[in-house]
Image: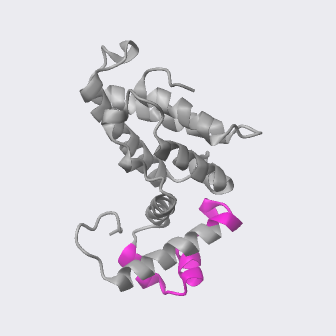
Amino acid sequence: MTSQDDGARVDPRVLRTRRLLQDALLALARERSLDEISVADVADRATVNRSTFYQHYTDTDTLLSDALDAQAALVGADLSTIHPSLVSGETPEVLVRYATHVADNLALYRSVLGEHGSPVAVSRLRRRIGALALEGLERHGAPPALAAIPRPIAAAAIAGSVIGVFVAWLERDPLPPPQEVADWAWSAVAGWPTQG
C-alpha cells in the first residue's frame, strides 16, 4: 500500500509515518548507494519498527518511488500534470521544473536511474511518460517515424527514449542545463522539434 494508491482521505498519522519513512530513505540515499540500504536501515532512521514499515510499504523500491514523487510534487514538478493537448507545443514548464529538480538532486537521481538503480522508480516513470505519449499520439497522430507502429508500442518507444535522454544527460560532465534536457525530452515526447 502506498500513498499514491489511496483514493480516499488518508489518516494524518499514516501520512506522517509515510513522510518519516520517505525522508529517512532519501537521507540514507544521500549517504550510500541504494543497494546498501535495507528496510531495517530505513526503519531505524525513521525511528519506527520494521512492522510499521511493512504496514505502509512492501519494499524500499516502492518507498523510494513514492519519496521521489512526493519531492517532485513539492517543487511543482509532478509530470502527471502535463496534459496531452500540449504535446505539439513548447516544452511545458513542469518538465523544466522536473529537470531542475533532478539536477538539484543529482547524486540521488544518478543512483536511481543508473545501472544499479531502482527498477520500480524507472518503471513508474516509464508508465507516466508512456501514458502521456499515448494520449498525445491519440490526439495528434504519430510522427512519420512511428506511424506504422501500433500506438501503445510507439508510446512505449517514446517513454524509453525520454528516460534514455535523462539517463544520458545525467552521465554528462559538466551537466547541460535543465532547460536543455527538458527540450530534448519534450522533443522525444512530441515527435517534433522544440523551439529551443
Q: Is residue 25 left or right of residue 32?
A: left
Residue that extends furthest to the right in the rendered view of this protein:
174
Up-down relation of residue 21 to residue 130 (above or below)? below
Relative side of 39 to 189, left or right: right
Residue 18 sits above or below residue 36 on the image: below
Give the residue displayed 34% in from the left and 63% down from the top.
4
Who's the residue at 46% across and 31% down the image?
90
Dominant SS of magenta comes to helix
Q: How is the image coloured?
A: one colour
| Left or right relative to 111: residue 43 | left
Point out the image quarter for the N terminus: bottom left
Name the image quarter holding the C terminus.
Answer: top right
Foreground residue among 177 and 134:
177
Instruction: Using the image as rendered, state which of residue 142 and residue 121 is in the foreground.
Output: 142
Which residue is rendered at x = 67% and y = 39% of the image?
A: 177
User: In this rendering, does residue 38 appear at all?
Assistant: no
Would residue 144 be visible to someone looking at this image?
yes
Disc tally is 0
Tell me if 34 is positioned left or right of 148 in this view. Answer: right
Could you tell me which residue is drawn at 65 percent across and 54 percent down?
A: 104
Q: Position of residue 101 (x, y in %)?
A: 58, 53
Q: Position of residue 179 (x, y in %)?
A: 60, 38
Measured as percent of width and height from the top left, residue 13 is found at 37, 85
Please check the rendered image and state whether residue 27 is part of the magenta-colored stretch, yes or no: no
Task: Report the span colored magenta.
Answer: 29-56
The image quadrant that residue 62 belongs to is bottom left
Where is residue 167? Give x, y as percent: 59, 39
Q: Is residue 55 shown in magenta?
A: yes
Farthest left residue? 8
- Decide which of 154, 13 is in the foreground and name it: 13
